Image: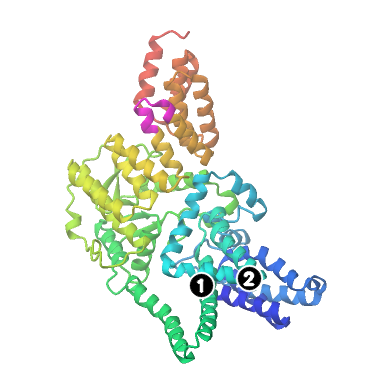
Amino acid sequence: ILLMAVLFYLLLLWSEKKEFNYLYLASLIFGLSLAIHRHTLVFLPIFIPWLLFTDWRLIKDIRRLTLCFFLLLLGLLLYLYLPLRSLHNPAIDWGNPQTLSRFWAHVVGKQYGGGETLFLFAPITLLTQKWLMILHRLSPCLRQLYQEMPPYISWLAFVGLIALFRERRAWFFVTLSSYLLTGVVVNLLIQFGSTLPSFFFFTLWVGYGIRYLLIKGAQWNRRLTAHSRYYSFLSSLLILALPISSLLTNYPFNDRSRHFLAYDYGMNVLATLDEDAILFMHGDNISFSMTYLKLVENKRPDITIYDRSGNLFEDIYQTRDIRPSDLTRETWLKRKDRIEREIMVTTSRPVYYSPRRDMFPMPDYELKHIGLVYCVAKKGAPSREEPDYYSRYTLRGVDDETIFKDQMSRELVAEYHYHLAQHYFEEEDLARAVAEVKKAGEARWDIAGIHYNFGLIYDAKRIYDQAIEAYEKAIEINPDFTSAYNNLGVIYARKGRFEEAIQNFEEAIALDPDFPSPHNNLGATYGEQGRYDKALKEFEKVLKLDSDFMGVYCNMGLAYYKKGDWEMARHEFKKVSRTDPHYRVSRHYLRTLKKEKPR
């Protein structure tokens, strides 16, 4: 934002004074700014018309344009730090940008879905998005603006906008279009858009609003023939009051002197793990706490940690040896499942996950909830008695409301209450479990994943009405939450509300057509309704997306069996028996088909 402010100031000076040194320096700053954050690119549709509007003859000045382009590239050379540092295999080698393809994938943010939405297709993208989804993506802009700019300051921005429109119309359109691009368009097109640049333009308007009121105040002062010294003193006092009030208001929110949540959370996780354990982790809170504690403080050297994104610690998934374009979602998930299963089968060390993962592709294993983590266990293995971890955890400031907690910190607080709720559910203490669920919801009411996790707990305990409520809350917060729609459809199907189930499965498929699970569940629901041809079409789609998807062959066998095509039913059930000889449903129907004659 500092570089962005300098950049706009230099371009403003050039537009007024026509001195090319300002334009040259602006080109260098633009390159540096783009190297620091790729979202700077959104200003190109503003800068180019602004430059041509200021001096259209610039387009003919090849020498000066070449120099500007060279200086821009000079600023972009900052990107060379990435491959040069990566060659030395640092502790955190995010994206391993040593090859051209990995370097480009890292720069455009392919991991976060970046680099795929071109601004040329922006109008089409916006038109195809649902209004609910658009509002969902814009809501953080409005909420953060309210947090950053309280109403007693915000109204000054509208005064500044009116003043700009009257006095400097070109600058009015430049700042307004920049605000809309950085605050609205970026958040609609990019999953992890930043609203901070838009606040910069908002503060510019506040500044112009103050300037306008001061000029008007001086004019009224002269008309009232009041002593000018009083007006100067009062106006200076009001100007000083703004940063001072901001400091006094915001200091408590930025005081971290009693903020131990991230550190204690990581230490509590380490305290839960057995000696010589393996931990698979995923998510910012756990990942960066563990990275610090392991690499900086060298805590628990007996523990091996793997980051499931492949960006931290040892890259057991070997993502650095393949091109990012070859790593589709399905190949990435299958690679993770295969490698993690190999470790589970071959190691004698205890294996843990944080957070919970879906064990569906590994039917002979299950996860057991232990404190803040989940331990991998063979199905049918005897349970061991676990200590009361929560009485041993360090919980400094978790429920202390005098300590300000930002979004990530509140997520940690919700994690504690979520795990405690899960513990009480396992102990069949429903009253205390529900109380902890409510506390987790209060701590992180605005994150869809927390409510989704509540849904998983209620679903596992067959408390379906609360599960539906939790999944619907997750969808309300995040209307493109594919898994929530899918799980909601499963519950409706169990309750016999097939049309609602189908509606939710179709919603999940519309959001992510390459997600096989809703296709499989939709096919099973069609089968329950006796619509076997439609069911089989959905199962075929599942196989195209993932030929190893568990359960689809059994579902196909059931559809063929109920349809009366017993030969095809036998063929599908045999496939299930070959891949999983312990699958009871397939064995039952194969025995039945031996007794019956095919029609």
Residue located at (78% from left, 73% from top) = 58
Identify which amino acid the numbered label 2 is placed on. Answer: Arg
Q: Please tell me which residue lies in front, 137 or 102.
A: 137
Say left or right for 288 vs 272: right
Q: Quadrant of residue 106?
A: bottom right
- Dominant secondary structure of the magenta stretch? helix
* x then y, percent, for residue 203: 51, 71
* x then y, percent, for residue 549: 46, 35
* x then y, percent, for residue 523: 47, 27
Q: Quadrant of residue 490?
A: top left
Say left or right for 65 vs 260: right
Residue neighbourhood size for the residue with mark 1, other residues' Cα within 10 Å, grouped as few (<14), some (14–19), many (≥20): many
Residue located at (42% from left, 78% from top) = 242
Identify which amino acid the numbered label 1 is placed on. Answer: Val
Tally the numbered discs: 2
Say left or right for 57 vs 312: right
In the depicted structure, whether residue 85 falls above or below residue 274: below
Q: Which residue is mark 2?
A: 166
Q: Looking at the image, which residue sits at the far front?
A: 224
- The stretch of residues the image draws in magenta is 490-500
Mark number, residue 206: 1
Q: Earlier in the sequence, mark 2 or mark 1?
A: 2
Q: Looking at the image, which residue sits at the far right?
A: 60
* x then y, percent, for residue 205: 54, 71
